[in-house]
Amino acid sequence: GESVGLHLPTLSVQEGDNSIINCAYSNSASDYFIWYKQESGKGPQFIIDIRSNMDKRQGQRVTVLLNKTVKHLSLQIAATQPGDSAVYFCAENSGGGADGLTFGKGTHLIIQP
Amino acid sequence: DAGVTQSPTHLIKTRGQQVTLRCSPKSGHDTVSWYQQALGQGPQFIFQYYEEEERQRGNFPDRFSGHQFPNYSSELNVNALLLGDSALYLCASSLGRNTDTQYFGPGTRLTVL
């Protein structure tokens, strides 16, 4: 079946650098995408979302880019901090209002001092 | 403003037993979704409740059932537990028929021995 996936399971970056986490999706009907951050022992925390009628959205230190042509989603974190260490999941919703979210496997972001 | 709460935080059961997990949605939310997250994996959608009815269901057997109460809180029941049911069970809440923006609780860690 169609699913959301991630390119890299682990990403290690230096504190203060920018991080880019990638996600590929295969369901062309998906019209809403979300990034979640999950720290050890906790539930996923909403970071930022984007709808399919947009290609970029910015939040505080985070930017999500959507490329519908190649079905690619990315999360950019500026000036990475130790508190950004976590597993990051992208999730998609194919719309219709009644479907659950489809998650990828996640990328573990490690911040090096 | 209360976030999503879940109880209990941890639970240990043996094979064949039954378990009930509970969730209270974020204040103002009326839709509850349940997810199962195996270790090292992304959450998988179990089902969603709105107006006290199951609206949509993922690929989970009938051993998994649920309920939503008039105050929007929800229960997840799992019968005839299997070792493979060991996971983090997450509850997410959202508002109305628009299920896109889902906010997650801390989860219940279920261990089946």
Image (spheres, rainbow, N blue to C red):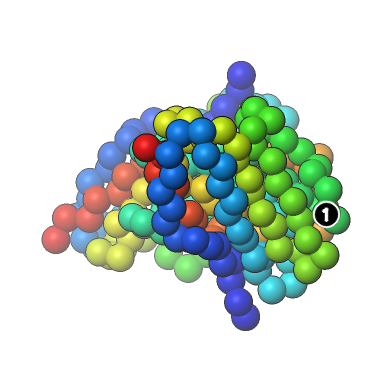
Of residues A108 and A72, the one drawn nearer to the viewer in this rendering: A108
Q: Residue at position x 43%, y 65% from top? A: A61
Residue projecting furthest to the left: A113
Q: Which residue is identified by label 1?
A: B52
Element assignment for label 1: loop
In this view, the residue in front, B100 or B67, is B67
How far across and down, in percent of the image, does residue A58 sit? 54, 60
Please indicate whether residue B72 sits to the left or right of residue A15 in the image.
Answer: right
- Examine the rendering and report whether any part of residue B89 can be seen: yes
Q: Residue at x 33, y 55 (%)?
A: A40
Residue visible at 52% across and 48% down?
A: B89
Crowd band around label 1 with a 10 angstrom C-alpha radius: few (<14), some (14–19), many (20+): some
x 27%, y 43%: residue = A11
Residue A17 in the image, given as x and y percentages of width and height: 26, 57
The answer to whether residue A73 is visible is no
Image quadrant occupied by the N terminus of chain B: bottom right
**Left or right: A18 with respect to B38?**
left
Image quarter of residue A48: bottom right
Residue at the bottom extreme, as displayed: B1
Tell me if residue B1 comes above or below residue A53 in the rendering: below
Depicted B26 relative to depicted A88: above or below: below
Q: Chain of mark 1?
A: B
The residue at the far top in this view is A1
Front residue of A50 and B106: B106
Q: Position of residue A13 (x, y in %)?
A: 23, 50
- In the image, residue A66 above or below residue A5: below
Which amino acid does the dot numbered 1 rest on? Glu
